[in-house]
Image (spheres, rainbow, N blue to C red):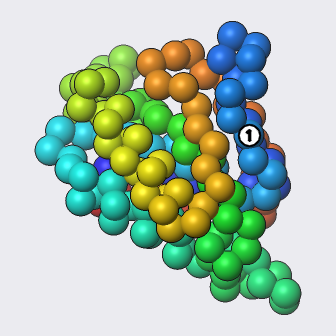
Amino acid sequence: MRAVVQRVTEASVRVHGELVGAIGAGLCVLVGVTHGDTSAEAIKLAAKLWNLRVMADEAGVMNRSVAETTKAVLVVSQFTLYGNTERGRRPSWIDAARPEVAEPLIDELVAELGRLGAFVATGRFRTDMAVSLTNDGPVTVLIDL
């Protein structure tokens, strides 16, 4: 699994103009699934996101996790994180897992974050989503499991 994690002051997802998920301050996480990813990776990624120390403490230092602060996470599936641009001008999506494989793993990630105590908002799988966010910092981290 691969994730782009952004610390945000707010983030939301719209599908055909309808608001389907939103958070205030917290983490906006774009998640890609590749072949061979398992439930174990989804659980490991949830723990990593929950405990990742990218939230500011009282001194403005990235020393807190979302678990210790806002508890808000917006998870958006993003198969394009596995786009291969090594050759040509058009990315290849061959490394991205098929939707029927990826969707249950994204659902498991979301469920595990919820079990950990997160307030989780999501996008809508297999739709054209418009993601809006206000990056806080800016802080953006790539996690590759």
The answer to whether 46 appears left or right of 11 in the picture is left
Q: Is residue 145 above or below residue 122?
A: below
Identity of the residue drawn at 47% across and 49% down:
110
The quarter of the image holding the C terminus is: bottom left
The answer to whether 117 appears left or right of 138 in the picture is left
Identity of the residue drawn at 67% across and 65% down:
71
List x then y, in percent, for residue 28.
Answer: 63, 49
In the picture, residue 89 is in which quadrant?
A: top left
List x then y, in percent, for residue 120.
Answer: 61, 50
Residue lying at the far bottom of the rendered structure: 59
Q: Nearer the viewer, residue 32 or 117?
A: 117
Residue lying at the far front of the rendered structure: 115
Q: Is residue 86 above or below residue 54?
A: above
Q: How many marks?
A: 1
List x then y, in percent, for residue 103.
Answer: 35, 32
Q: Amino acid at mark 1?
A: Ala
Identity of the residue drawn at 70% across and 23% down:
14
The answer to whether 23 appears left or right of 100 in the picture is right
Q: Is residue 74 above or below residue 5?
A: above
10 Å neighbourhood of mark 1: few (<14), some, or many (≥20)?
many
Identity of the residue drawn at 37% across and 47% down:
108
Q: Is residue 118 above or below residue 31?
A: below
Q: Which residue is tagged 1? A: 22
Q: Nearer the viewer, residue 83 or 75?
A: 75
In the picture, residue 97 is in which quadrant?
A: top left
Can residue 139 be seen from the camera position used here?
A: no
Q: Secondary structure at mark 1?
A: strand
Can residue 65 be seen from the camera position used here?
A: yes
Q: Nearer the viewer, residue 5 or 115?
A: 115
